[in-house]
Amino acid sequence: MPGRWIPDEELDERWNSWSPVEVAERLTGVTTPWCIAAGWALELFSAAASRDHHDIEITVPAEGFVEIAAAFPEFEWDIAGDGQVWPYPEMMSEYFQTWLREPRSGEYKLDVFREPHIGRQWLCRRDQSITMPYDELILRTSDGIPCCRRGGF
C-alpha cells in the first residue's frame, strides 16, 4: 500500500525535534528499556561529533513501543520508510521507524526505532546473530540520559 511521499525539503521543515533532555523528561517513569540513538547518541559522548540535528532518534524493544506510545497521548504516530509515511499502525510490520507528530502543527518531534529483541536482550536488526543485554547496550550521560553504546544500530 503506497504511503504519502514527503520530499526531503518538506521533511526538513516538518522536523522540530525535542532535545535529548526533553525526551528524557517526557519518558520519566517509562520502564521499557529505551535510549537515544544515532547522531544524538554520538553527540552526547563526543564533542568531536558535533553537528546540527534536525531529528532525534530513540530505540526501544519492539514490544516496548506500546509503553512509549502511551507516554504521548496527545500526539499522533506515523510509520516511516523508503521516503514515505503511513498513519500508525499501517505498515508497522514492514518498517521499524515510528515518528511522533504534533497534531496541530504537523511537526515531528521524535523518531522511535522499534527493534527486535528476546526479553531484555537486544538483537541487531541487520544481523540477529549480534546480540547484547540492554543493561550493557545502554550507557548514561553524566545527566542520566540513556544513550546507545554505539550510537545506532
Image (spheres, rainbow, N blue to C red):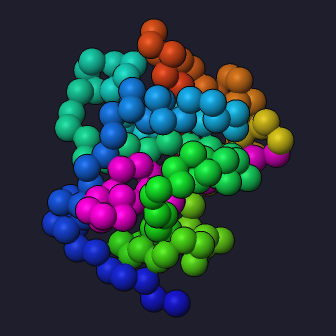
Relative vertical location of residue 102 with respect to residue 95 in this rendering, above or below? above
**Nearer to the camera, 54 or 47:** 54
3 is higher (above) or lower (below) than 77: below
Vertical order, 45 against 74 (above or below): above
Residue found 83% across the figure and 41% down from its top: 119
Residue 56 visible in the snapshot: yes
Image location (x, y in percent) of residue 25: 46, 29
Q: Residue furthest top?
A: 142
Q: Is residue 127 visible?
A: no
Q: Residue furthest right?
A: 119
Residue, x 39% and y 60% (percent of image)? 101
Of residue 54 and residue 65, the one placed in the foreground of this image is: 65
How would you classify the magenta stretch by its main secondary structure? Answer: strand
Residue depicted at x 68% and y 23%: 136
Residue 27, x across and y down, in percent? 54, 35
Query: Where is the C terminus found, in terms of image quarters?
Result: top right
* Relative horizontal placement of residue 2, taking residue 63 as reference (left or right): left
* View extreme (bottom): residue: 1
Q: Is residue 7 shown in magenta?
A: no
Horizontal side, residue 131 vs residue 98: left or right: right
Q: What residue sits 59% from the left and 53% below the top?
A: 69
Q: Residue 3 at what x, y percent from top left? A: 43, 83
Quadrant of res 19: top left
Residue 113 in the magenta stretch? The answer is yes
Region of the chain picked out in magenta, as a range: 97-118
Task: Decide: is 104 above or below 32.
Answer: below
Q: Quadrant of residue 13?
A: bottom left
Whether residue 149 sits left or right of residue 125 in the image: it is left
Give 101 or 117, whichever is nearer the viewer.
101
Number of marks present in the image shown: 0
Q: With 15 as the anchor, is 136 left or right in this view? A: right
